[in-house]
Image (cartoon, coloured by chain):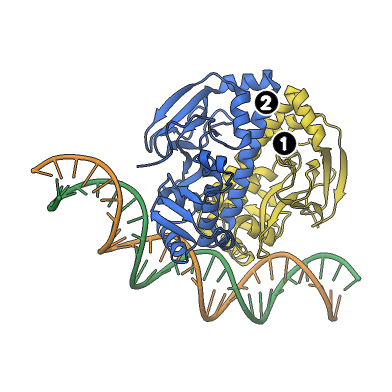
Chain colours: A yellow, B blue, C orange, D green
Amino acid sequence: MRTQDFDAPASGGPQAAGQVELAERLILPGFVMRFGRNEEIFGEGEEADFVYRVVAGVVRTTRFLADGRRRVCGFHLPGELFGVESGGLHRFSAEAVGECQIALVRQAVLVEAVERRPAAAHALWAASRRDLERLQEHMVLLGRRSAAERVGGFLLEMAERAVQIPTELDAASGRVRMPEIDLPMSRLDIADYLGLTIETVSRTFTQFERARIIGLPTSRHVVVRDRQALADAQA
Amino acid sequence: MRTQDFDAPASGGPQAAGQVELAERLILPGFVMRFGRNEEIFGEGEEADFVYRVVAGVVRTTRFLADGRRRVCGFHLPGELFGVESGGLHRFSAEAVGECQIALVRQAVLVEAVERRPAAAHALWAASRRDLERLQEHMVLLGRRSAAERVGGFLLEMAERAVQIPTELDAASGRVRMPEIDLPMSRLDIADYLGLTIETVSRTFTQFERARIIGLPTSRHVVVRDRQALADAQA
DNA sequence: CGAGCGTTTGAACAGCGTCAAAACAAGTGG
DNA sequence: CCACTTGTTTTGACGCTGTTCAAACGCTCG
């Protein structure tokens, strides 16, 4: 099972500039833990004693509704922070999508750093805003009506974010976007992320494939053939 | 047209503790402007020279899609900050829902404050996290399928947030929640916020009324009769 | 090879969007 | 005070899209 390159250094590749900055400026003591596929990192309602940073792999944050349905609220890629709460409790649970390495930092240490070091406060503020902006974009996406719009938007988002990992040679050659997406998450994860059902997600994928908008070598590997069509599906 | 009490002081009533803190700790120079109903405060793509704080009234942030549809991304109530961007440009536009008073602060001043005063950085980080958390909740809501779930969630959100304004006597009497909601926004605003159509929103309101879950003295005034049923509609 | 999971596909149904029109509220001028 | 206007909200009828239920398919790993 290929998920992400596992031994890639935490702030190795050409990641978002802000995330590099975050890692550099926060210089926080912490320790790294490994989690297996679908393993829970923390649960909804637990004490938020720690703050987490993805070193390798992908994490999803979820919430369960009263009737048992699950909402996937976000995916977290290497370099990103998650589990930061202002109240004392986690409002979501977090699980490893595939094999993961996660760096843990005590919440108290973070707060202290914020109070003592302006640079840390600044970096954290910047990180929050980035999260906020990503979330806003996702919200716009969720408000869209048709399944094609949602799935199209999701693929674009993933293309945008995921390239940042396997692109080292790409960066050297000067090519900016590489339309290959390795989806570490299942159809169910995607469906719960987009507010659709697995069936609809699956149908939309094959629909895109038949329309030559994407290629599907395997169900978890997407080749974007017609980026514009994906954006248009988003109308 | 009653919208909000207009001469209420910015950080007057028993608002969210964090917002009071924000106003107190940020002590930023700024000037107040007035905006009329539906007037644009800033537009998508404009330079984000300023940061804005609602003094009185309600503001909505929106984005227009290519096909002309509009997404309402959030409502901002008195005390709240909006228009804070990490890039140099506004990614949304903002309009006054009703008559508004808005305090403007130069972005540069804010950044300087963050760098000089740890308290300011801390307060801003906290504010970002609150926004983030509100947005996460809204995302959970948008992922919900049925119209009843979305409208129910919206009413609960508004009940939760809006009480904080007209509650002075309420606070004295010790009562915590007052299930009366004055909606300053139109059905269209609500629909675009929830990813539904005005017709569906309207139908859901009357459906709730017939089921004795809410009362509708006027279309913009909601009395919550059965809070639990609203939460259940959210399943 | 078979078991188990994830994915795809099919058919029938329900809910929301669309189009259209009526009811209502608020403001304007006779 | 009423007739008229404009904008918002409500209601109705119909079609489409996504959900639901069900079954088949295709991996991967024992």
- What secondary structure is found at the residue carrying circle 2? helix
The reply, left or right, for residue C14 in relation to residue C1 is left
x and y percentages locating residue B15 in the rendered image: 57, 37
Mark 1–mark 2 Cα distance, whole angstroms, equals 25 Å
Residue B220, x across and y down, in percent? 40, 50
Query: Which sits in the foreground, B214 or A217?
Result: B214
Please state which of the two labelled residues, at mark 1 or mark 2, is closer to the viewer.
2
Tag 2 residue: B121
Amino acid type, label 1: Gln
Residue A131 versus residue A216: which sits nearer the camera?
A: A131
Q: Is residue A9 visible?
A: no
Residue B200 lies, in percent from the top left, at 43, 60
Q: Residue at x 49, y 62 (%)?
A: B213
Amino acid type for the residue under numbered disc 2: Ala
Count of all numbered marks drawn on residues in the image: 2
State whether residue A16 is above or below residue D30: above
Identity of the residue drawn at 69% across and 24% down: B119
On the picture, is A32 further left or further right than B129? Answer: right
Task: Give the chain letter at badge 2.
Answer: B
What residue does disc 1 label?
Answer: A15
